Amino acid sequence: MTLPSLQLIPDATNLNDDDVLVVGLGTTDAGISVRAEGLAPDVVESILSSAQKIQADGSSDKTWRIPSPAGCNAGSVVLTGLGSGELDAHTLANAAGYAAMALSKPTPARIVFALPHSGESDVAAISEGALLGSHRVSKIGTTTQFVTTIAVVGSLGEAALSRVTAAAPSGLASARSGYHATKLFEPSNLC
């Protein structure tokens, strides 16, 4: 089992049926709002309409899965609650982790996070949460499909990828260590 690779992509226009798109859903005094990077305005409106139809409330630590709207080629869309507060690294990491955990069956090959962010530290937080949330435990004698790629939508570009993955030893490095440590205690590795 290998660790999922990390990609930074400029927008969410070149997705396919094997991808799952993750967008943020926040709460305001006026109701819910879609908070996302790299999506066309009509896609955002369609996602908001679908979220309202299923009565998604944007609460932190919750997720909702909807069909991919017209104009979005992903297999499906996961809405992850951002709550009503300011977006910080902790909130983004939690939202990404909950979204990744919600995608247990079937597990997509690539999860594309279009969560709002303000720089490399936020992208690192999204990546950490996604990495930890995408961990799966296999039962003895079974085969489990694992996420192979975690992508984050934004304008940072590929030059930032090495900086994001190397950022804060307590960040991604710690998440990777935790990911590998939990693999040691899976039933298939204890025999």
Image (cartoon, rainbow, N blue to C red):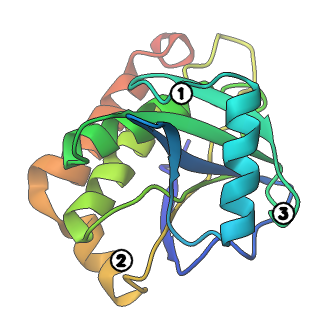
Question: Three-letter amino acid code at disc 3?
Answer: Asn
Packing grade of label 2 (10 A; few <14, some 14-19, many >=20) is some
Give the quarter of the image for residue 71: bottom right
Q: Indicate which disc, 1 or 3, sits on the residue closer to the N terminus.
A: 3
Q: Nearer the viewer, mark 3 or mark 2?
A: 3
Q: Indicate which disc, 2 or 1, sits on the residue closer to the N terminus.
A: 1
- In this figure, which residue is indicated by the disc labeled 2? 161
Packing grade of label 3 (10 A; few <14, some 14-19, many >=20) is some
Rendering coords of residue 191 (x, y %): 52, 10
- In this figure, which residue is indicated by the disc labeled 3? 73
Give the label on residue 101, or none. 1
Q: Is residue 82 above or below residue 119?
A: above
Report the residue at 65% width, 10% height from top: 140
Packing grade of label 1 (10 A; few <14, some 14-19, many >=20) is many
Q: Measure how far apart labels 2 and 1 are at the Cα level.
A: 24 Å
Q: Are marks 2 and 1 in contact (CB under 8 Å)?
A: no
- Element at badge 1? helix
Question: Three-letter amino acid code at disc 2?
Answer: Leu
Report the residue at 37% width, 24% height from top: 182
Rendering coords of residue 10 (x, y %): 54, 81
Task: Please state, as top left, top right, bottom left or bottom right, where the N terminus lies in the image.
Answer: top right
Give the label on residue 160, or none. none
Report the residue at 50% width, 66% height from top: 37
Using the image as rendered, state which of residue 71 and residue 42 is in the foreground. Answer: 42
Q: Measure how far apart labels 3 and 2 are at the Cα level.
A: 24 Å
Q: Indicate which disc, 3 or 2, sits on the residue closer to the N terminus.
A: 3
- Element at badge 3? loop
Question: Three-letter amino acid code at disc 1?
Answer: Met
Residue 41 shows in this picture: yes
Residue 86 is left or right of residue 179, and the answer is: left
Rendering coords of residue 114 (x, y %): 53, 59
